[in-house]
Image: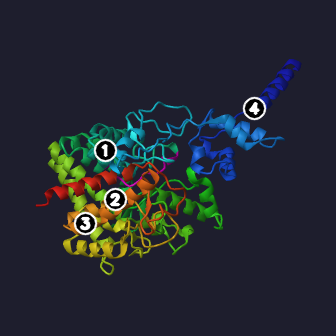
Amino acid sequence: MKIHYTYFILAFLLVVSCEKNEKVQVESLYETQLFKDVQLAAIFKDSKAFVDLVPKKEASILETEYLSEKDLDGFSLKEFVGKNFEDKSMKALVFETDTTRTMYEHITFMWDNLTRGPDSVIPHSSRIALPHKYVVPGGRFQEIYYWDSYFTLEGLLVDNRDDLAKDMVDNFAFLIDSIGFIPNGTRNYYKTRSQPPFFALMVDAISRKDEKTLESYLPQLLKEYNFWMNGVENTEIGKSNHHVVKLGEDVFLNRYWDKGFTPRPEAHKEDLHLASELETDSLKKQLYTNLRSAAASGWDFSSRWFGEKDVFGTTETISILPVDLNCLLYFMENTISEAYLIKGDQSHGKRFKDKANRRREAIQKYFWNPENGLYHDYNFQKGAVTSELTLAGVFPLYFEVAEAEQAEQVKNVIISKFLKDGGLVTTLEHSGQQWDAPNGWAPLQWIAVKGLLNYGYKKEAVEIMTRWLALNEKVYKNTGKMMEKYNVEDLSLLSGGGEYETQDGFGWTNGVALGFKKILDEMEEQKP
């Protein structure tokens, strides 16, 4: 009995010892107290900077060490981070502008400066490694972003960089195959959401010289479509399920949606601050989901998503069916139909064409506002179009959903209300958010111009392109850089508002500038 008792004591001491040194069990860095404390302490000016650093150890080990050291005399959180994290960012965008180059020559030169990959896997890094080369936007964005990449790709095709454009598409196909969808960007903290689904347009763009290319990406097109339509079988009329909302028998439209309900890791402090005035955890979680879903839209942030005018904290993205998203899914359905027909599968080709036709009818029914002569978003919870006029309302022209009379009314609204000295303003609201006035964004200029050209409004399209490129060239002359966004109302400024400072680089601005120049040059050549 004495021996047994001794063994018991030894075993007890061993258990106590193990418990004392046991790692804190967490699945990711973003769940740790260390992460929360670093972000709230604002050690870095930009909240994104910390989540892009690479931990030297597993999150569980770091959390255990942090909790055991943080209350010791002389402990420095900044020093702890410096000791346990490293910056393995890809090459910074450092270059000297050659003032002898035109803006367009500069853009061509910049492609190689913005090209990254193929990636090697870095342990504990937030980066999602990609197998092919790709072009990053620039500035703080040293990974690829989903919808940015389409407009960048159009510029690459103008510059005859077809190989790099195809690499971009192949990377997105890889993401669909490996993750099941294309995340917001290639960081693990973006894996709760996607972005505007431009993959079908990318595939269509690189298929212009050979339509059979379209067929080769059919498996990925279908997988992405299934991601957006997940839950469609179990959705009741008037209800939502993930990205899907059922409005009638066999009538489905989509919304932006993020499955998370916590502050975004890359904006933890900012989201927490915005939710601090809410009284209950339930309301805070709801706001976090709405903020994340607004980020999924690419329009982060905008008064477009506000429930109450000028009140950022009333963001209600998940209640809104966006007109641009549903036009993109209309194109996806048509593209899948076309790919099936190229393959010789008439049955599936017709099935997806029918889906596209039903969606087109729903777009006309729910998004068109005859009183304003513009397409609006639709709040399915309130059963009405939203009041805000935004450039998202030109997407039906880009995808040729609008009737001729509707297109004329949209044209009139765009020219009379949205056209400013430097191009088209994003919305008519001056909320302080970056996807509002006075800012103009390259992708929306592209959508509007191409949409107007689809309906024969050449003069108006030329006016927009001319004003936009003049502003791009002016800023380039003064700074030697291409910007993420521009102030189109006050041409003495670059831009205003937003979560972060104006970024330079810049992928989609470069692509749209080259695309516009090509259109204008071709128009000039066609003159008698």
Q: Can you identify the residue that label 4 sits on?
A: 21
The answer to if 194 sits in the magenta stretch is: yes
Which element is circle 3 on?
A: helix
Q: Within 10 Å of the Cα at label 3, are there few (<14), some (14-19), or many (20+) other Cα atoms?
A: many
Q: In this view, does 393 lie above or below 39?
A: below
Q: Nearer the viewer, residue 310 or 519?
A: 519
Type of the residue with mark 2? Leu
Q: Which of the two marks, 1 or 2, is nearer to us in this view?
A: 2
> Residue 384, relative to residue 92: is it above or below?
below
Q: Provide the secondary structure element on which disc 2 rests.
A: helix
Q: Position of residue 6 (x, y in %)?
A: 86, 21
Q: Which of marks 2 and 4 is nearer the N terminus?
A: 4
Instruction: Tell me the amino acid under the disc marked 3.
Output: Leu
Q: What residue type is disc 1 on?
A: Leu
Q: Which of marks 3 and 4 is nearer the N terminus?
A: 4
Q: What residue would you read off at disc 2?
A: 469
Q: Which residue in the protein does label 3 denote?
A: 452
Counting from the top left corner in percent of width and height, residue 365 is at 29, 72
